[in-house]
């Protein structure tokens, strides 16, 4: 069976799509369409190509109509980041992130194509006795959008019933039918344009008007266009569709439209496609499939050293939100960096860092050619494993376990948390003599203090559960040198990942590495991971064995790395409290960070949010008390009237007459 599915692409296509025999990427841009990336060609036979900003991916659909292989039995059209899931082979426990409108999947790769049946054999099976495969429609009555109802005046707001309500309560925006959904959802098309479509159908295709009215009064909608259909159906469908779309484009006033509304024609194309095949459903065999949305469609490439010689590899972890704090760490590295070394800084990200933040971070080293900053998302290599972040710890910490395998061309790397600053050249730490040891790190005062009595049951967890032979030699992996070459020689990727995903650990990747590296750890000078005091940690340090604690106190006299260890719920960070222990080290570099103003804003916002949270709690308590008193008064009033003068009784009616005659009239 000859099948070809066209995928519109603006940028260089994912190699998985390029190498798939079923998928045919077509590149498009402002005024051009081509089958080769970024190679504009003559598009005289594609009149809408000159209106790229309004037709977008529909330009490629037009190209498909005019250039589809006449010998193909079936042709298809997918979006660059959304394919029709022809099959769904996922286990049920992997479907938790699905929405009612689409399947969500992290990456577009060969595993994904196999999982959702985007292969010749699977599609041939799905197309047996089928004319068209279309997207599943979405029930708008099940869609819920947030709508802020914050009362500007913080005084109590009362409902018509007299009940006092919380002014911070939020409501939800729901829809009764498709027309209401289009009217209230600002991301959809303008209702005036919908009226233009109705007039256009009345003139050009009046037989479709009843179908449109039925569609709008119903509860099912389709947001995006996508299909697989018999080649013989394509001409009739596209001729009808583009005849209407090109006329609609001419009569719509789009002069004041922004980015969202300039996609209106794509929305109308999805609506019209539904009308077309709904009208012809009796003569066609149609099946429906959900869209699968790929959150990341870029190629995944394993990292290569940034410099060919003297490459000092440093790996930090950060989310987009945490990046301003991570910038202070980077600034401390920059200030102590030597011109004789090349510094390869890799920031692991748990989510896509914005382009703006990437530009800000890389600009920090724009005048330092011997320092490189790159961002890398390791999810592509981890999402097949059931890695579970430890309770109260961020997802990014567990990502570090992948370092030996995503850095397969590196022999070693310095890996650190982002809540610390360097007071020495990081290259000194990188060149630590390790022999055949797997990791070099500092003994963990805090965890050992918890084992020694600060947290009952902690010692048993490490000795009985995790089977550590020397629990009081437990290390902190917040600052470590990782002998990647030796670690890969000792443990394969599958061994490491399967062990890491075998259970939930108390301190995820730190517990894992203490177990895997036990007996092969190089213990660093304590100054390379100097803890600060504060919060609950002051109590914990009181349980730490004296010899270990004395080592920390000595290191604090001349720290090489100041580590603001611990969760902020237990102990504040210096960007939350500038008066905390050793905060001067952090702010010394923060003042030179491009995020300095943002750091000040976030610190003030943190305090404001705390005060607002307390105020909201007070408001809620007063509301509850006021309503409780109101209910008590009502109960008392009800008891008074109902017991002596029951509703409907003659006594009550007689007294009402007397009241009206003498009291109310004033006689």
Image (spheres, grey):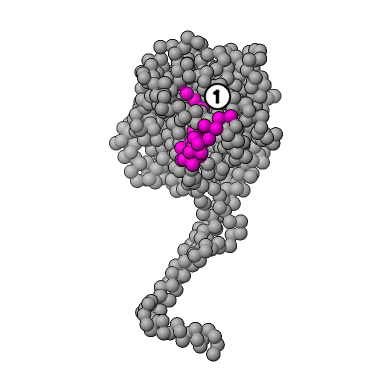
Badge 1 marks a residue whose secondary structure is: helix
Q: Is residue 208 magenta?
A: yes
User: In the image as oriented, which residue stretches furthest toward the top?
Assistant: 71
Q: Is residue 319 magenta?
A: no
Instruction: Tell me if residue 482 can be seen.
Output: no
What residue sits right under mark 1 in the picture?
A: 240
* Residues in magenta, as a range: 204-228
Dividing the image into 4 quarters, which one contains the C terminus?
bottom right
Residue 665 occupies which quadrant of the picture? bottom right
Instruction: Tell me if residue 137 can be seen.
Output: yes
Left/right of residue 638 with respect to residue 276 in the rendered view: left
Q: Residue at x 67, y 41 (%)?
A: 597
Q: Residue at x 55, y 30 (%)?
A: 205
Expressed as whole percent of the image width and height from the top left, the position of residue 404 reads: 45, 21
Dividing the image into 4 quarters, which one contains the N terminus?
top left
Expressed as whole percent of the image width and height from the top left, the position of residue 389 reads: 42, 35
């Amino acid at each position: 069976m000859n099948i070809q599915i066209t995928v519109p692409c603006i940028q260089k296509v994912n190699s998985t799509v390029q190498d798939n025999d079923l998928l045919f990427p077509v590149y498009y841009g402002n005024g051009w369409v081509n089958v080769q990336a970024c190679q504009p060609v003559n598009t005289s036979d594609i009149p809408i190509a000159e209106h790229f900003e309004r037709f977008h991916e529909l330009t490629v659909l037009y190209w498909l109509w005019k250039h589809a292989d006449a010998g193909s039995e079936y042709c298809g059209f997918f979006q660059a980041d959304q394919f029709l899931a022809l099959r769904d082979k996922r286990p049920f426990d992997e479907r938790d992130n699905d929405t009612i409108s689409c399947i969500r999947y992290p990456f577009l790769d060969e595993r994904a194509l196999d999982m959702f049946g985007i292969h010749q054999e699977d599609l041939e099976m799905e197309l047996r006795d089928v004319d068209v495969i279309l997207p599943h429609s979405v029930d708008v009555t099940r869609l819920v959008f947030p709508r802020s109802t914050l009362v500007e005046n913080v005084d109590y707001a009362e409902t018509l019933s007299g009940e006092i309500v919380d002014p911070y309560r939020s409501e939800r925006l729901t829809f009764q039918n498709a027309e209401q959904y289009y009217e209230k959802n600002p991301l959809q098309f303008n209702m005036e344009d919908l009226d233009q479509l109705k007039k256009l159908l009345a003139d050009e295709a009046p037989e479709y008007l009843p179908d449109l009215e039925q569609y709008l009064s119903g509860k099912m909608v389709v947001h995006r266009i996508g299909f697989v259909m018999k080649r013989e159906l394509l001409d009739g469908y596209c001729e009808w569709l583009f005849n209407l779309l090109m006329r609609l484009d001419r009569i719509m006033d789009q002069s004041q439209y922004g980015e969202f509304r300039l996609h209106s024609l794509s929305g109308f194309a999805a609506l019209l496609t539904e009308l077309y095949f709904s009208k012809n459903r009796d003569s066609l065999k149609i099946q429906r499939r959900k869209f699968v949305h790929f959150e990341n469609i870029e190629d995944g490439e394993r990292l290569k050293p940034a410099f060919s010689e003297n490459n000092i590899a440093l790996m930090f972890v950060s989310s987009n939100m945490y990046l301003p704090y991570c910038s202070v760490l980077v600034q401390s590295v920059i200030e102590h960096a030597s011109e004789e070394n090349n510094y390869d800084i890799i920031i692991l990200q748990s989510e896509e860092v914005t382009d703006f933040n990437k530009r800000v971070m890389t600009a920090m080293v724009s005048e330092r050619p011997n320092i490189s900053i790159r961002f890398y998302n390791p999810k592509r290599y981890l999402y097949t494993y059931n890695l579970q972040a430890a309770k109260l710890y961020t997802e990014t910490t567990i990502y570090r376990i992948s370092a030996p395998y995503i850095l397969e061309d590196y022999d070693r790397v310095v890996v650190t948390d982002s809540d610390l600053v360097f007071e020495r050249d990081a290259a000194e730490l990188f060149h630590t003599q390790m022999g055949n040891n797997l990791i070099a790190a500092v003994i963990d005062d805090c965890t050992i203090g918890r084992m020694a009595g600060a947290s009952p049951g902690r010692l048993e967890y490490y000795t009985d559960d995790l089977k550590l032979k020397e629990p009081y030699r437990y290390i902190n992996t917040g600052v470590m040198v990782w002998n990647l070459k030796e670690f890969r020689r000792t443990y394969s990727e599958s061994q490491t990942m399967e062990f890491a995903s075998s259970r939930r650990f108390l301190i995820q990747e730190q517990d894992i590495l203490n177990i895997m590296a036990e007996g092969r750890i190089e213990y660093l000078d304590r100054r390379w991971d100097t803890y600060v005091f504060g919060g609950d940690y002051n109590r914990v340090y009181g349980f730490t064995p004296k010899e270990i604690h004395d080592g920390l106190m000595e290191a604090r006299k001349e720290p090489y790395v100041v580590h603001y260890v611990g969760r902020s719920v237990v102990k504040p960070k210096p960007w939350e409290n500038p008066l905390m222990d050793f905060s001067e080290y952090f702010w010394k570099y923060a003042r030179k960070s491009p995020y300095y103003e943002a750091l000040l804003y976030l610190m003030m916002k943190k305090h404001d949010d705390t005060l607002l949270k307390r105020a909201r709690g007070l408001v809620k308590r007063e509301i509850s008390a006021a309503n409780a008193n109101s209910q008590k008064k009502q109960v008392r009033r009800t008891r008074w009237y109902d017991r002596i003068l029951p509703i409907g009784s003659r006594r009550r009616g007689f007294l009402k007459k007397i009241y009206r005659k003498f009291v109310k009239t004033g006689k």
